[in-house]
Image (cartoon, rainbow, N blue to C red):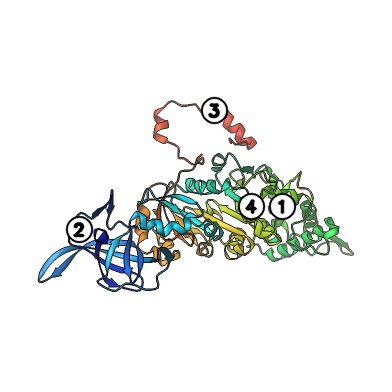
Amino acid sequence: MWEEKRIGLVREVSGSSLTVHIDETITNLSKKIGDKTYFIGQLGSYILVPVGKNFLIGIVSEFRKTDFSSNGQTAQRYIMTVTPIGTMKEGRYETGVSVLPTAETVVYLLEDKDLKVAFSVYQKFNFSVGKLSMFEDQKAYLDPNRFFGKHIAVLGSSGAGKSCTVSSILQKVVALPDTNIVLIDIHNEYKKAFPEGSQYFDLAELELPYWLMNFEEVQEMFVDPTDENAALHVSMLQDLILLNKKVKNQRLAEMITIDSPVYFDFSEVRARIQFLDSEKTVGTGGSKEGPYFGKFTRLLVRLNSKLTDPRYAFMFKPKIMADSESAKALMMMIFGLTGKSKITIMDMSGIPFDIVKTVVALVARISFDFNFWNPNRRELPILLVFEEAHNYLSSSDRGATAARRIVERIAKEGRKYGVSCMIVSQRPSEISETILSQCNNFVILRLLNPIDQSYIRRLVPDSFSGLDSVIPLLRQGEALILGDSMPMPLRVQVDMPNPPPDSSDVSFFDKWKQKGAKTDANEVMERWWSQQRTQ
């Protein structure tokens, strides 16, 4: 039995890889074992190497054909490079390798039944994200506790299948009785994928009041750091907001800090700044400009532009969220504590782009702070899903840092408080390296940008070495999955979501060939003026 599985010999051994020469008798690079034909040397396929009583499992990371000299004659041989990833001990699979084989050790194909042994420990969770590309009858089982609890990065170029992959993964847990997911939906794609067990909020209509912001978020929104009076703007805002919070919340006055999520009246704060900016005193020599005269003019312009803009009404003109007590109902709604939903979809497609980063920072921070102060945090694990994360978690955006900083904190400390992240992006090289470096699980779909490919190589474990060459070749919805939650790096065709998200591309050519419904410019302009979007 073992002889029919033999494919070659180990010729060289290094600290991180094996060089294997394929037997000369194998010319068509395939072996039929039982009813199945196995192909030899495919990138991402697996092999077995006996080491004493155990078996080393390796993954093929490189395959080539080269000239080989023997007894004065030159012949061509197939050679493959193998990265060791685990060990089979007494019928049980263990991640990692303690003993490497020596040269001249025989190398065998890994059969379906051998792979089932490796997945046997993980099958108890009955959580699979798809089927193995190399073994289409074998499901890719994961440990869902490690998968969702240790941060996830879903990375792939536009059109590679990110939205479908995210929907498929989340649909597998949204049916559970006490799932808690908050999804930042930048393009309103996910409402269709979760018709049940979810709640959908259009943030342009949901009240997310300004007084929930901490001072860093207020400062980022209103203070121009290049203004010569920026330091004065910061200190005055801080003093006036804190004072107003204490005045409006007498019961909590002694405990309130500048970052406390309690109601304050921004119009009163603004009125006081307006007074200081235009203040004049009357003395013996006539009227005299006050000490702050004209120093808050640019701050007032920024304040007025936000406070009076109808696009920002969901933050600065709350009708329901008009006192501190209303925050309790909002928290219950966002985190599904009423029992009506398992996933909260935050649709940000209708809010101004320049405020997206602040809103993301606010949603992420209140999620973290809620469980930080929650004595039962272990009973309420929360997964935050950041779609199109490169838009607001960039390390190069020096002008807007609140969102990046809070997500960096969650990436580093969130697991202690039951808060985990799923980072979804088509441009991983633009995302803060601090955030991605804390991800323990990677779902890598097709990536075409060489800069992004190079960035991924630096972040992922050594067991990924050599597999990066297949990233541009992956099919739509096919992914390389690696991390703490699985026995070995896996090449997986992810299950299709049912129903799918609303993320499909427009078929330009097909539409151009047909006479479809005409666009009514009058209707479009009326919707544009009234900010009424199609759901």
**Horizontal arrangement in the rendering, residue 49 relative to residue 264 (left or right):** left
Tag 4, which secondary structure? helix
Question: Looking at this view, is 429 or 117 the one in front?
Answer: 117
Q: Quadrant of the C terminus?
A: top right
C-beta proximity under 8 Å, tags 3 and 2: no
Tag 2, which secondary structure? loop
Earlier-in-chain disc, 1 versus 3: 1
Looking at the rendered structure, the kind of residue marked 3 is Asp
Q: Is residue 417 visible?
A: yes
Earlier-in-chain disc, 4 versus 1: 1
Residue 520, which numbered label?
3
Looking at the rendered structure, the kind of residue marked 2 is Ile
Outermost residue toward the right in this view? 284
Please say if 13 is above or below 244.
Answer: below
Earlier-in-chain disc, 3 versus 2: 2
Residue 359, which numbered label?
4
